[in-house]
Amino acid sequence: MLRDAPLTISRREGKAPDTHVIKLAGPITLPNLFAFQDELHSAEPPAVVILDLTEVPYMDSAGIGAIINYFVHCRKRDAKLIVAGVNSRPLELFKLARVDSVIPMAATIEEAEARA
């Protein structure tokens, strides 16, 4: 997948009440950053937000910055953000930025929902 490929975003209800899963597919990069941020901030976060990155093959520093920003946004509103399904390349960026020790992460959506 190309780094400038489109990013698609979908939302669904999670298994637990007041839980939403936001599924991302495609790279999270500067060209699609503003659409990504607009979607994240389009509504008040529920009690638990699971950000599904299973289909995100690549992320740049702008993408990780947007996720950190949304994590802070959720915390200010007493909402919990869990990032799930992070692939190897984005995971390297999470580790490099040491975000993996701050933002809760889960290997799968099922694991994230169990931790919610």
Image (cartoon, rainbow, N blue to C red):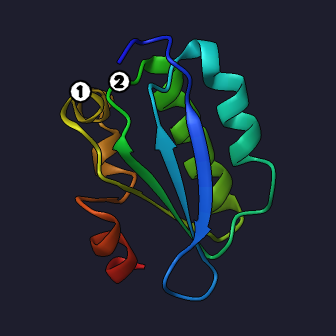
Residue at position x 68%, y 72% in the image: 46
Task: Measuring from the top left, give residue 105's x and y in whole percent.
Answer: 31, 57
Whether label 2 touches label 1, CB < 8 Å: yes
Residue 106, labelled with which disc? Answer: none
Measured in 3D between alpha carbons, the distance from the residue under mark 2 to the one under mark 1, in whole angstroms, is: 6 Å
Query: In the visual, does 112 lie left or right of 30?
Result: left
User: Circle 2 — which element?
Assistant: loop
Amino acid type indicated by mark 2: Tyr
Q: Quadrant of the C terminus?
A: bottom left
Query: In the visual, does 87 lie left or right of 23?
Result: left
Q: Nearer the viewer, residue 83 or 20?
A: 20
Rate crowding at label 1 as few (under 14), some (14 to 19) or many (20 or more) other CA atoms within 10 Å: few
Amino acid type indicated by mark 1: Arg
Q: Quadrant of the N terminus?
A: top left
Residue 58, labelled with which disc? Answer: 2
59 in relation to 104, above or below: above
Rate crowding at label 2 as few (under 14), some (14 to 19) or many (20 or more) other CA atoms within 10 Å: many
Task: Measuring from the top left, give residue 89's x and y in whole percent.
Answer: 23, 27
Return the residue at label 1.
89
Query: In the visual, does 64 lie left or right of 87?
Result: right
Task: Measuring from the top left, give residue 54's x and y in whole percent.
Answer: 33, 47
User: Circle 1 — which element?
Assistant: helix
